């Protein structure tokens, strides 16, 4: 979340400045990544580290291109993303309902809060063997894992957001004749939106972590499986290519999400 | 108690903000004790339903072995010392990685807010590294540092570094200028200002960063252990899973729930301790 703040600061200073400057600005901003690339290549060329451990970037890129054109990479990416997004979508639906119910109805809070309290600090990756026992090695086990792992950040985000709503807003809406459900839809949810969206952002990050780690352990396709089987086979340039690709997807997903989030919250800053 | 129960449900990022106006639900009610007992009752009822469901055959005992069997297994393992070895190793790896990340990440964050070159170098790295799934890099660390503790700890440190450095950077930039100016006009040196003014003001956000990083570190530790095998709670659980020993898997879950709870609550207590002077604690 702080990284997003840093991002906003680096936006072009002049509003409406030509696109070219935006691109130049971004290029300049991300230039330190080139420094890392130079260090990587320098270390490789110097012979201090074996090329096995630090394959040169040309080879990595050509491996990437080969897998991309071959369709391997796209197929596995599609498999992985379908798992992570179905788990995440379920978690958002259920989590939102549970969090809002907790914030607005006392019985729901008394029932759900102890469960949240106990399971919130648990490292969710510990559930991998559990879902394996429950649902085997297929898609369902990974979707369940991602669902369970993403659920609590959404619940807590929705609960904190809805609980923090200024009660005067609720009272006003009530006194103007709004029903319970209308208050929820028209007042509480919009007011709680920033925290809800933040909870979902945490959940998005978790969905990627859990997707990759469950595919390392229990899968026969997907990007995580690709990484671990390439690593086991000793095909390191290809392994590096897939790892960097997965990192890039995670980064892109977060960027797209924050862009949508900013759009959704635009009315607040006006 | 209702108030404090709600405070502990929180996490991430929420604490650093000023207290939101109390809603109808947040007020301390005379029924607070009732609330607590109902919640304890819910937990007990769930445990009872677990036990009864498994014993009476409503649930396949392979999918969910009876709670008493699970507890008996934990008892056996505790008697042989295996529980303490597993939990101890997991805790050691998680905390060591977390600690290394804090020792590197906090100074990097502070330097970013003060030295332009450091900011130029690390700002893009943080904004790229913060959202990416760090766990994907695990095979690289295995390749570089082999499968023993070194690569596990480095992996944990790598995944904890980004939230800590980003939170410290955000916390130490854009501080209120007035306290800094006052300190300076009283003749404080730059180093004194850093220690006495800047850091205390940034402390809530730094702690929030640590509170984000610690669970991430625990998740990562468990995954590394599952992937590389050996002792540690993750390794034991994945072995139990592979041998279809469901009692062993659930014993692991109960243990890791306890460990996670302990670790996260300790950090919350530490926060309350360190921020005893801060308005957020006196709410």
Image (cartoon, coloured by chain):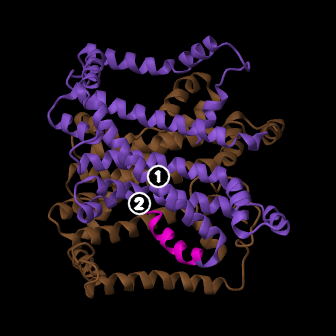
Query: Residue beneath label 1, please?
Result: A89
Give how far across and how far down residue A26 sits, in percent: 56, 19
Q: Residue at x 53, y 54 (%)?
A: B211
Q: Quadrant of residue A124?
A: bottom left
In the depicted view, which residue is nearer to us: A270 or B96?
A: A270
Query: Residue beneath label 2, please?
Result: A148
Disc nearer the start of the sequence (1/2):
1
Query: Which colour is chain A painted?
Result: purple
User: Can residue B269 be spotted in the picture?
Assistant: no
Overall secondary structure of the magenta section: helix
| Rendered position, B227 above or below B253 | above
Q: Is residue A110 magenta?
A: yes
Instruction: Give the residues in magenta.
Output: A108-123
Which quarter of the figure is the C terminus of chain B placed in?
A: bottom right
Q: Chain of mark 2?
A: A
Give how far across and how far down residue A39 sits, in percent: 37, 18
Q: Is residue A132 magenta?
A: no
| Rendered position, B115 above or below B101 | above
Q: CA distance from mark 1 to mark 2?
A: 11 Å
User: Secondary structure beneath disc 2?
Assistant: helix
């Amino acid at each position: 979340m702080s990284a997003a703040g840093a991002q906003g600061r680096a936006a072009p200073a002049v509003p409406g400045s030509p696109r070219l400057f935006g691109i130049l600005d971004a290029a300049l901003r991300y230039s330190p990544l080139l420094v890392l690339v130079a260090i990587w290549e320098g270390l490789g060329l110097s012979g201090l580290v074996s090329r096995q451990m630090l394959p040169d970037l040309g080879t990595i890129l050509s491996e990437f291109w080969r897998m991309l054109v071959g369709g391997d990479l796209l197929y596995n990416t599609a498999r992985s993303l379908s798992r992570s997004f179905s788990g995440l979508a379920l978690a958002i639906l259920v989590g939102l309902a549970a969090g809002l119910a907790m914030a607005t109805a006392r019985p729901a809070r008394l029932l759900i809060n102890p469960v949240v309290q106990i399971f919130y600090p648990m490292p969710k990756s510990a559930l991998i063997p559990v879902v394996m026992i429950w649902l085997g090695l297929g898609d369902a086990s990974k979707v369940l894992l991602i669902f369970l792992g993403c659920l609590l950040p959404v619940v807590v985000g929705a609960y904190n957001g809805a609980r923090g709503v200024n009660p005067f807003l609720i009272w006003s809406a009530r006194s103007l004749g709004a029903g319970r459900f209308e208050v929820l839809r028209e007042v509480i949810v919009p007011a709680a939106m920033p925290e809800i969206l933040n909870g979902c952002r945490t959940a998005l990050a978790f969905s990627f972590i859990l997707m990759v780690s469950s595919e390392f352990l229990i899968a026969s396709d997907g990007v995580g499986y690709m990484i671990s089987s390439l690593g086991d086979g000793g095909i390191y340039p290809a392994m590096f290519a897939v790892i960097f690709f997965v990192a890039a997807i995670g980064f892109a997903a977060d960027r797209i999400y924050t862009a949508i989030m900013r759009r959704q919250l635009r009315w607040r800053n006006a | 108690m209702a108030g404090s129960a709600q405070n502990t449900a929180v996490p991430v990022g929420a604490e650093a903000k000023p207290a939101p106006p109390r809603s109808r639900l947040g007020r301390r009610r005379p029924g607070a004790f009732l609330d607590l007992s109902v919640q304890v009752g819910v937990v007990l009822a769930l445990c009872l339903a677990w036990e009864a469901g498994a014993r009476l055959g409503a649930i396949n005992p392979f999918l969910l072995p009876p709670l008493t069997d699970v507890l008996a297994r934990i008892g056996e393992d505790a008697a042989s010392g295996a529980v303490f070895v597993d939990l101890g190793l997991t805790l050691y790896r998680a905390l060591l990685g977390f600690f290394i990340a804090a020792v590197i990440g906090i100074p990097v964050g502070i330097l970013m807010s003060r030295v332009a070159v450091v900011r130029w170098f690390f700002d893009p790295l943080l904004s790229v590294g913060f959202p990416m799934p760090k766990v994907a890099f695990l095979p690289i660390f295995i390749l570089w540092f082999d499968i023993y503790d070194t690569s596990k700890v480095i992996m944990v440190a790598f995944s904890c570094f980004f939230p800590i450095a980003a939170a410290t950077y955000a916390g130490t930039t854009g501080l209120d200028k007035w306290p800094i100016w006052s300190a300076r006009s009283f003749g404080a040196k730059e180093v004194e200002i850093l220690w006495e003014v800047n850091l205390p003001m940034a402390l809530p956000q730094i702690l929030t960063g640590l509170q984000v990083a610690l669970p991430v570190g625990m998740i990562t530790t468990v995954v590394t252990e599952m992937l590389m095998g050996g002792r540690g709670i993750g390794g034991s659980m994945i072995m139990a899973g592979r041998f279809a020993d469901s009692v062993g898997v659930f014993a692991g879950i109960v243990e890791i729930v306890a460990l996670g709870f302990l670790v996260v609550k300790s950090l919350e207590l530490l926060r309350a301790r360190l921020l005893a002077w801060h308005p957020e604690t006196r709410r």
